[in-house]
Image (cartoon, rainbow, N blue to C red):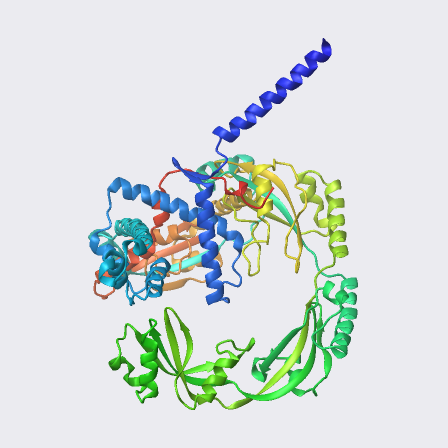
């Protein structure tokens, strides 16, 4: 009976557990990436948006690789989410206000826009493949919605019609969003009173005598700060410490694993073997060398394209068949072999004519070879079908070696054409015709082979670093011990505050904004980390510079950063101490506030004269409250003593005047915008709370 009861209880627990799990899967929110107000962001929408950003990044890398070379891909998740949130909020506002996209706006966007969408360009290409001569969006629209006029059937154009209607729907949405954002931006405008107030501040001048003594380094014993002082100061400035999202304060260690002395010694041996391999046989490496990560690259370059330094010096000066380890450093080595030195034309000048369609290229080619000049193309043929580019220089060699701008067969055909035009490229959509107009001067071309090896820490080195860190963690299992003893073991501890929206752990310095692959640390902190706990070891996937990460959660807070936070406590302590010092100095100097000279002497400083003091415009007074008091004071002989946040000020307003600068409304409209700098995103969001779960979907388990 006892065994039956145990089995029954276990079976019941299993069934209930399974039911609860299935209930969570069926009725839970496991695909909710975020929630803004009452609007949810689903994972599928997020995934589509992130893929869209990935494609844009890849396009940017192809078009301008240097511009995005240091872009941190860990930014993409939050960028995708931010866009989705903005779109949802704007779409709600558009719907509530009933903002339409007018037919005129649609026409301008879809038919008259000089920068059509990729989807529109694809439709044009499909029509051209059907031998329909279209070069503009208006022509494409007419062709697909009036198929008989272009000898097309309804079946042929139906897919294109659906694609165009989808583009049109998307355009309506985009234009409505733009209209709303423009309307919203227009609500933040200066009125006549705003402009006049800014103008009055700009032209109002004061002649001010000023003495200033900074607090400097204050004695902690002379100006003690009690817990009651801190509590009072905290309550007075509590809103300064408000947090928008749940936040956790962490201590963080990043161990950058560098190659060891043994790794560098092995690299030196490897460079010798690589040089010997080049001497023994060109363009081949042994299996063992390939396992070490070595590969040979053959290059054909001009001297100016070879990387400057030891490699260029060796390749351009050494005899053919020479082999050398041209450079060796802590980062790796370079081995090169000179194969051949030749002379070749490095560029050609072409006259190029692009012709749309299948039949027209032959007619254009005949006219060109019959004597029609390239300058007369525009008058002889429709510019919608034929585009001419005269005297275009084509580089045959570049920094990567031999250019792929022209294939060898194409170049030979141009050289053998005797000055006639030839068909360089042809297809269903059209052809490219070209004539060799001029050849560049011959340059010396160097054919060489190169092995470039980047030295990385070995698996042994990485394991040793991990073992050392594991030993430290085994002896320091709490956040307090972690922070206290890390420095003794040679680890640098950094303090950070992470939120649900943290993209990764930020770097203190360097080109990248975040430590690579450190989003996994954020995931542990936000999901599993409790105050006082220490994480396991996380590892960057960057083989060139592997890094080990560990985090310890010191505290967490949801509404306000607590007074116990070290940075908050230090801020309040300094502020209270400065205030106490200011109170004492006010008593010390107040009785002597007679003439400016006597007050300045008592303060131990020299007075200064500000002949053109303007409020808020590089006034010469750092404390804005003091600057405001000076600007609001009338001329007189009385010296005013003021306790500022950064020191004690004594001033006397000796006179006032007006600048003769004329009023210009546009100037103060601009100043108003600069002063308030409206955050449209925050205006759209308003007081809606954001629940950000993105960290649950990123960085794996």
* Occupied quadrant, residue 121: bottom left
Q: Is residue 636 visible?
A: no
Please provide percent x and percent y for residue 165. Answer: 29, 51
Does 145 sit left or right of 281 as displayed?
A: left
| 98 left or right, relative to 240 | left
Task: Report the side of 673 relative to 192 (left or right).
Answer: right
- Give the total number of marks visible in the rendering: 0
Residue drawn at (48%, 78%) of the image = 406
Check the picture and name the quadrant holding the C terminus. top right
Q: Position of residue 624 (x, y in %)?
A: 39, 52
Image location of residue 457, percent across then percent down: 72, 59
Residue 523 visible in image: yes
Q: Residue at x 23, y 55 (%)?
A: 105
Q: Could you tell me residue 354's position as x and y percent?
A: 36, 76
The N terminus, quarter of image? top right
Height in image: 417 above or below 580? below
Toward which corner of the image does residue 336 lie, by quadrant?
bottom right
Answer above or below: position of 501 versus 530.
below
């Amino acid at each position: 009976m006892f065994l039956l009861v145990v089995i029954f209880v276990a079976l019941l627990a299993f069934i209930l557990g399974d039911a609860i799990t299935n209930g969570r899967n069926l009725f839970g929110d496991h695909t909710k990436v975020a929630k803004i107000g009452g609007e949810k962001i689903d994972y599928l929408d997020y995934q589509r948006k992130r893929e869209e950003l990935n494609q844009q990044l890849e396009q940017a890398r192809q078009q301008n690789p240097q511009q995005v070379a240091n872009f941190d891909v860990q930014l993409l998740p939050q960028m995708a989410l931010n866009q989705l949130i903005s779109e949802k909020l704007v779409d709600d506002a558009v719907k509530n206000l009933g903002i339409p996209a007018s037919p005129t706006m649609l026409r301008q966007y879809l038919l008259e826009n000089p920068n059509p969408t990729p989807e529109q360009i694809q439709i044009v290409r499909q029509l051209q493949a059907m031998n329909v001569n279209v070069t503009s969006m208006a022509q494409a629209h007419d062709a697909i919605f009036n198929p008989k006029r272009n000898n097309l059937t309804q079946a042929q154009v139906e897919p294109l019609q659906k694609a165009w209607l989808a583009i049109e729907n998307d355009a309506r949405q985009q234009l409505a969003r733009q209209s709303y954002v423009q309307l919203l931006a227009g609500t933040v405008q200066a009125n006549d009173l705003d402009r006049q107030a800014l103008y009055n501040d700009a032209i109002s001048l004061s002649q001010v005598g000023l003495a200033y003594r900074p607090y400097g380094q204050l004695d902690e014993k002379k100006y003690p700060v009690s817990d009651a002082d801190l509590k009072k100061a905290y309550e007075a400035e509590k809103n300064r410490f408000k947090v928008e999202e749940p936040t956790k304060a962490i201590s963080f260690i990043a161990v950058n694993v560098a190659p060891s002395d043994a790794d560098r010694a092995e690299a030196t041996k490897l460079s010798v073997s690589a040089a010997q391999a080049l001497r023994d046989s060109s363009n081949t490496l042994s299996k063992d060398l390939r396992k070490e990560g070595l590969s040979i690259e053959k290059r054909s370059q001009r001297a100016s394209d070879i990387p400057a330094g030891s490699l260029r010096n060796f390749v351009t000066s050494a005899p053919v068949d020479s082999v050398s380890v041209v450079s060796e450093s802590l980062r790796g080595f370079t081995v090169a072999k000179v194969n051949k030195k030749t002379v070749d034309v490095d560029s050609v000048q072409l006259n190029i004519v692009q012709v749309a369609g299948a039949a027209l290229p032959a007619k254009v080619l005949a006219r060109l070879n019959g004597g029609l000049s390239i300058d007369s193309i525009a008058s002889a043929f429709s510019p919608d079908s034929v585009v001419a580019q005269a005297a275009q220089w084509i580089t045959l060699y570049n920094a990567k070696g031999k250019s792929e701008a022209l294939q060898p067969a194409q170049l030979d055909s141009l050289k053998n054409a005797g000055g006639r035009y030839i068909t360089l490229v042809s297809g269903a959509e059209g052809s490219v015709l070209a004539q060799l107009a001029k050849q560049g001067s011959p340059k010396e071309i160097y054919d060489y082979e190169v092995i470039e090896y980047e030295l990385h820490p070995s698996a042994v080195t990485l394991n040793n670093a991990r073992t050392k860190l594991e030993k430290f963690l085994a002896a320091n299992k709490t956040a307090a011990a972690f922070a206290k003893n890390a420095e003794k073991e040679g680890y640098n501890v950094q303090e950070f505050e992470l939120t649900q929206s943290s993209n990764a752990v930020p770097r203190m310095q360097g080109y990248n904004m975040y430590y690579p692959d450190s989003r996994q640390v954020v995931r542990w902190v936000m999901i599993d980390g409790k105050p006082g706990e220490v994480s396991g070891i996380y590892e960057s996937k960057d083989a060139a510079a592997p890094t080990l990460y560990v985090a310890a959660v010191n505290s967490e807070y949801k509404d306000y950063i607590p007074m116990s936070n070290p940075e908050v406590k230090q801020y309040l302590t300094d502020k209270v101490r400065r205030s106490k010092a200011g109170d004492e100095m006010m008593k010390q100097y107040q009785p002597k506030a007679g003439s400016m000279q006597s007050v300045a002497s008592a303060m131990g400083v020299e007075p200064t004269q500000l002949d053109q003091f303007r409020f808020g415009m590089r006034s010469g007074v750092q404390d804005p409250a003091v600057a405001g008091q000076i600007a609001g004071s009338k001329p007189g002989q009385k010296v005013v003593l003021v306790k500022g946040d950064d020191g004690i000020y004594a001033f006397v307003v000796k006179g006032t005047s007006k600048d003769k600068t004329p009023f210009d409304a546009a100037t103060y409209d601009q100043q108003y915008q600069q002063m308030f700098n409206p955050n449209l995103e925050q205006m759209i969001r308003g007081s809606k709370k954001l629940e950000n779960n993105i960290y649950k979907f990123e960085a794996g388990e």
